[in-house]
Amino acid sequence: MNTAVNWNLIREARLFLHLLNEEQKAAFLTLAYRVSLADGEDDLDEVSALEDIKAQMHYDGTPEMSEVLGDLPLAVFQTPKARAVAMTELLMITYADGYLHDAEAKIIGEIAQAFEFDQTRLNQMAEWAMDGLDLMRGGGKILDVVGS
């Protein structure tokens, strides 16, 4: 298992965020910051990856730290599709380092409960997120082999 956070994968992994409206993008970004801070590691690559996520969403705002550390902004994800997009993307962030940190798991669990995802659904989404990251790692290896 690769335990180094590969933030380059996270930068490139935004598959569904374009499906969110502006209010949902702002809330997602707040959640992404919260999840990225949960493990207690302060990493410049993390900050850079979050900036790249903002750019890919075409979103200019930055959440205030009081928002990041406050109540989780979940009410804006009103449809099952928006909830699935947010959860899948958050899971990809949490599994970028190859495992789910206890603090990350707590936040993901709170979000899953609020979104009414049972454990089976959450496990399916987590498996998909890990598979997606593995595919991107494999794609990166292929690109390394063929060169730039």
Image (cartoon, rainbow, N blue to C red):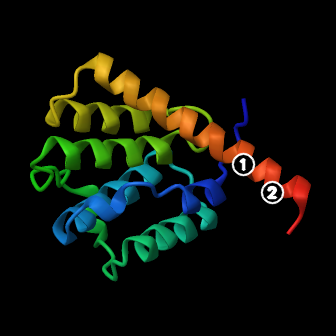
Q: In which quarter of the image is the N terminus?
A: top right
Is residue 30 shown above or below 93? Answer: below
Instruction: Give 74 or 72, whichever is nearer the viewer.
Output: 74
Residue type for callout 1: Gly
Residue situated furthest front in the rendering: 146
Q: How many labels does the image show?
A: 2
Q: What element carries label 2?
A: helix
What residue is rendered at 16% in x and 41% in y?
A: 80
In the image, taking residue 125 as reference, residue 21 lies left or right, namely left
Residue 79 is labelled as none
Residue at horizontal 23%, vertical 61%? 27
Q: Position of residue 120 (x, y in %)?
A: 31, 16
Callout 1 crowding tier (Cα within 10 Å): few <14, some 14–19, many ≥20: few
Left or right, residue 80 beside residue 124: left
The answer to whether mark 1 and mark 2 are in CB contact below 8 A is yes
Residue nearest the viewer, comparing 30 with 28: 28
Residue 69, horizontal then vertical, whole percent = 28, 57
Q: Where is residue 59 in the image (x, y as percent from the top left)?
A: 33, 77
What x and y, as percent, mark residue 10? 56, 56
Q: Which of 34 and 122 is in front in this view?
A: 122
- Quarter of the image for residue 44 reads bottom right
Q: Distance between the residues labelled 1 and 2?
A: 6 Å
Q: What kind of element bears circle 1?
A: helix
Residue type, numbered disc 2? Leu
Which quarter of the figure is the C terminus placed in?
A: bottom right
Decide: few, some or many residues near mark 2? Use Cα within 10 Å; few <14, some 14-19, many ≥20. few
Numbered tag placed on residue 139 in the rendering: 1
Residue farthest toward the bottom in the current orientation of the protein: 60
Q: Residue at x 31, y 68 (%)?
A: 65
Which dot marks residue 143? 2
